[in-house]
Amino acid sequence: MSKIHKKKKSEKATNEELGKMLVNIYETGYINHNQTYKYSFLKGVATGVGGVIGATVVIAILLSILSKFEQVPVIGPFVNKVQNSIEAGSPAK
Protein backbone atom coordinates (compact mmCIF):
# COMPACT_ATOMS: atom_id res chain seq x y z
CA MET A 1 0.00 0.00 0.00
CA SER A 2 1.13 3.50 -0.67
CA LYS A 3 1.80 5.96 2.14
CA ILE A 4 -1.03 8.23 0.97
CA HIS A 5 -3.55 5.39 1.06
CA LYS A 6 -2.44 4.40 4.57
CA LYS A 7 -2.64 8.02 5.74
CA LYS A 8 -6.19 8.43 4.40
CA LYS A 9 -7.20 5.17 6.06
CA SER A 10 -5.78 6.22 9.42
CA GLU A 11 -7.41 9.67 9.14
CA LYS A 12 -10.75 8.01 8.44
CA ALA A 13 -10.36 5.76 11.48
CA THR A 14 -9.39 8.73 13.64
CA ASN A 15 -12.39 10.73 12.41
CA GLU A 16 -14.71 7.80 13.12
CA GLU A 17 -13.32 7.49 16.65
CA LEU A 18 -13.75 11.20 17.23
CA GLY A 19 -17.33 11.03 15.95
CA LYS A 20 -18.14 8.15 18.29
CA MET A 21 -16.67 10.03 21.25
CA LEU A 22 -18.72 13.14 20.42
CA VAL A 23 -21.92 11.09 20.13
CA ASN A 24 -21.13 9.48 23.48
CA ILE A 25 -20.61 12.89 25.13
CA TYR A 26 -23.87 14.14 23.62
CA GLU A 27 -25.88 11.09 24.71
CA THR A 28 -24.59 11.07 28.28
CA GLY A 29 -26.00 14.54 28.87
CA TYR A 30 -22.61 16.04 29.62
CA ILE A 31 -23.38 18.86 27.18
CA ASN A 32 -26.34 21.18 27.71
CA HIS A 33 -28.35 20.90 24.47
CA ASN A 34 -29.94 24.35 24.78
CA GLN A 35 -26.55 25.96 25.19
CA THR A 36 -25.23 23.99 22.21
CA TYR A 37 -28.13 25.19 20.02
CA LYS A 38 -27.56 28.78 21.15
CA TYR A 39 -23.85 28.63 20.32
CA SER A 40 -24.59 27.00 16.96
CA PHE A 41 -27.07 29.75 16.12
CA LEU A 42 -24.63 32.49 17.14
CA LYS A 43 -21.87 30.81 15.14
CA GLY A 44 -24.12 30.78 12.07
CA VAL A 45 -25.04 34.44 12.50
CA ALA A 46 -21.38 35.40 12.92
CA THR A 47 -20.43 33.38 9.85
CA GLY A 48 -23.12 35.09 7.78
CA VAL A 49 -22.16 38.58 8.95
CA GLY A 50 -18.49 37.84 8.34
CA GLY A 51 -19.26 36.65 4.82
CA VAL A 52 -21.23 39.79 4.02
CA ILE A 53 -18.50 42.06 5.42
CA GLY A 54 -15.80 40.11 3.57
CA ALA A 55 -17.67 40.30 0.26
CA THR A 56 -18.25 44.02 0.75
CA VAL A 57 -14.55 44.64 1.37
CA VAL A 58 -13.52 42.58 -1.67
CA ILE A 59 -15.99 44.38 -3.94
CA ALA A 60 -14.88 47.78 -2.61
CA ILE A 61 -11.23 46.95 -3.27
CA LEU A 62 -12.07 45.66 -6.76
CA LEU A 63 -14.06 48.80 -7.57
CA SER A 64 -11.30 51.07 -6.29
CA ILE A 65 -8.77 49.25 -8.49
CA LEU A 66 -11.06 49.44 -11.53
CA SER A 67 -11.70 53.15 -10.94
CA LYS A 68 -8.00 53.82 -11.63
CA PHE A 69 -8.47 52.86 -15.31
CA GLU A 70 -10.07 55.01 -18.00
CA GLN A 71 -11.15 51.99 -20.04
CA VAL A 72 -11.35 48.43 -18.79
CA PRO A 73 -10.57 46.14 -21.74
CA VAL A 74 -12.80 43.18 -20.89
CA ILE A 75 -15.91 44.85 -19.47
CA GLY A 76 -15.43 48.33 -20.94
CA PRO A 77 -18.06 47.99 -23.70
CA PHE A 78 -20.62 46.62 -21.25
CA VAL A 79 -19.98 49.46 -18.81
CA ASN A 80 -20.32 51.99 -21.62
CA LYS A 81 -23.70 50.54 -22.64
CA VAL A 82 -24.94 50.68 -19.04
CA GLN A 83 -23.67 54.23 -18.66
CA ASN A 84 -25.38 55.31 -21.91
CA SER A 85 -28.63 53.66 -20.81
CA ILE A 86 -28.52 55.46 -17.47
CA GLU A 87 -27.78 58.81 -19.13
CA ALA A 88 -30.56 58.32 -21.70
CA GLY A 89 -33.08 57.47 -18.98
CA SER A 90 -32.23 60.38 -16.70
CA PRO A 91 -34.25 63.61 -17.03
CA ALA A 92 -32.62 66.56 -18.81
CA LYS A 93 -31.01 69.16 -16.58
Image (cartoon, helix red, strand yellow):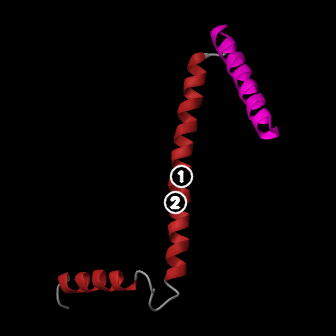
The residue range painted magenta reads 1-30
Looking at the picture, how far across and down is residue 20, in whole percent?
69, 16
Considering only vertical position in the picture, is 5 above or below 57? above
Q: Do the residues labelled 1 and 2 touch (CB within 8 Å)?
A: yes
Looking at the picture, how far across and down is residue 68, in whole percent?
53, 87
| Among the 4 quarters of the image, the one containing residue 14 | top right
Residue at 80% across, 38% down: 2
Viewer-proximal residue, 65 or 43? 65
* Amino acid at circle 2: Ala
Looking at the picture, how far across and down is residue 87, in whole percent?
24, 86
The residue under label 2 is 55
Considering only vertical position in the picture, is 79 above or below 61? below
With 91 as the anchor, is 11 left or right in this view? right
Mark 1 vs mark 2, CA separation in Å: 6 Å
Q: Does the magenta stretch include residue 84?
A: no
The residue under label 1 is 51
Residue at 30% across, 84% down: 83
* Amino acid at circle 1: Gly
The disc at residue 2 is none
Looking at the picture, how far across and down is residue 92, in whole percent?
17, 90
Residue extending furthest toward the front: 1
Q: How crowded is mark 1: few (under 14 residues within 10 Å), some or many (20 or more)?
A: few
